[in-house]
Image: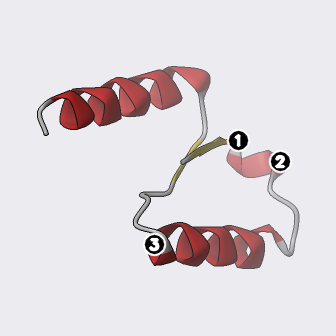
Amino acid sequence: MVNVRPDERIEPDGATKLAVTAAACRAVGWDFQRVDTPEAAIRSESHCVHRFTKR
């Protein structure tokens, strides 16, 4: 899962929420990443798709 959100848009309790989300993702075998730009999300997504197709 990829969360796209610039650093300046993360609320004070956002770090806790992101940590809980990351833990929930790990619990079901998913990866979690927060990136700050859509371009970074596209790079991350293409990497995930590449890994998935190699299985």
Q: Type of residue at label 1?
A: Pro
In percent of the image, x 49 and y 57: which residue is there? Answer: 32
Pointer 1: what residue?
Answer: 6
Q: Residues within 10 Å of mark 1 (few under 14, many from 20)?
A: few
Mark 2 or 3, closer to the camera = 3
**Which dot, 3 or 1, sits closer to the camera?**
3
Q: Name the kind of residue labelled 3 in the image.
A: Arg
The residue tagged with tag 3: helix, strand or loop? helix
Left or right: residue 8 compared with residue 34? right
Q: CA distance from mark 2 to mark 3?
A: 24 Å
Q: Of residues 20 and 12, which is closer to you in this image?
A: 20
Q: Earlier in the sequence, mark 3 or mark 1?
A: 1
Quadrant of residue 16 within the rendered picture: bottom right
- Decide: few, some or many residues near mark 3? Use Cα within 10 Å; few <14, some 14-19, many ≥20: few
Percent from the top left, x then y, of residue 43? 38, 25
In the rendered structure, find residue 50 and report the number of the disc placed on it.
none
- Residue contact at pointers 2 and 1, CB within 8 angstroms: yes
Residue, x 76% and y 72% (percent of image)? 17
Image quadrant for the C terminus? top left
Query: How is this picture coloured?
Result: secondary structure
Marks 3/1: CA–CA distance: 23 Å
Q: Quadrant of residue 6?
A: top right
Q: Earlier in the sequence, mark 2 or mark 3?
A: 2
Residue 30 vs residue 7: left or right?
Answer: left
What is the number of the mark on residue 9? Answer: 2
Tags 2 and 3 touching, CB below 8 Å: no
- With respect to residue 19, does 9 lie above or below? above
Q: Nearer the viewer, residue 41 or 24?
A: 24
The residue positioned 87% from the left and 62% from the top of the image is 11
Q: Which residue is mark 3?
A: 26
Question: Residue 24: x, y in percent?
Answer: 59, 74
